[in-house]
Amino acid sequence: MNANDILQALSQRPFKSFRLILSTGREIPVLHHDMVLLNEPRTTLLAVEGERFHVVDLQHIAQLTFGGQPTAEQLAR
């Protein structure tokens, strides 16, 4: 996954929520465009999920999926 793919998903208007699917199989919901920040060399991102945050190397993002709501487990985090 590259930074342009993430930036394109974040810049959609109206915004459509999506999930970051990591190489480990873990899913991180992105419910608002302000919940993700990319570092300057665009190699790492910070994703806020409720009161938690995730620092993810872009090389570990396997795909983005759109649509659907976050699971109850993800909302409870």
Image (spheres, grey):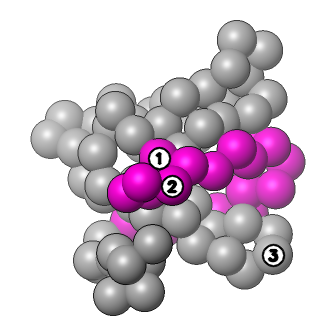
Residue at screen point 44% across, 63% down: 29
Residue tagged by mark 2? 52
Q: Secondary structure at mark 1?
A: strand
Of circles 2 and 3, the one toward us is: 2
Residue at screen point 68% across, 20% down: 39
Residue tagged by mark 1? 48
Q: Secondary structure at mark 2?
A: strand
Q: Are marks 2 and 3 in contact (CB under 8 Å)?
A: no
Q: Quadrant of residue 5?
A: top right
Mark 3 or 1, nearer chain start:
3
Label 2 neighbourhood size at 10 Å, few (<14), some (14-19), many (20+)?
few
Q: Which quadrant, please, contains the C terminus?
A: bottom left
- The type of residue carrying mark 3 is Thr
Q: Secondary structure at mark 3?
A: loop
Q: Nearer the viewer, residue 71 or 20?
A: 71
Q: Are marks 3 and 1 in contact (CB under 8 Å)?
A: no
Residue at screen point 48% across, 37% down: 36
Spot occupied by residue 72 in the image (x, y as percentages of width and height): 33, 88
Spot occupied by residue 43 in the image (x, y as percentages of width and height): 79, 29
Above or below for 23 versus 57: below
Q: Marks 1 and 2, Cα distance to the nearest angstrom?
A: 6 Å
For residue 56, side relative to residue 53 (left or right): right
- The type of residue carrying mark 2 is Arg
Q: Marks 2 and 3, Cα distance to the nearest angstrom?
A: 18 Å
Span of residues in magenta: 48-66
Residue tagged by mark 3? 24
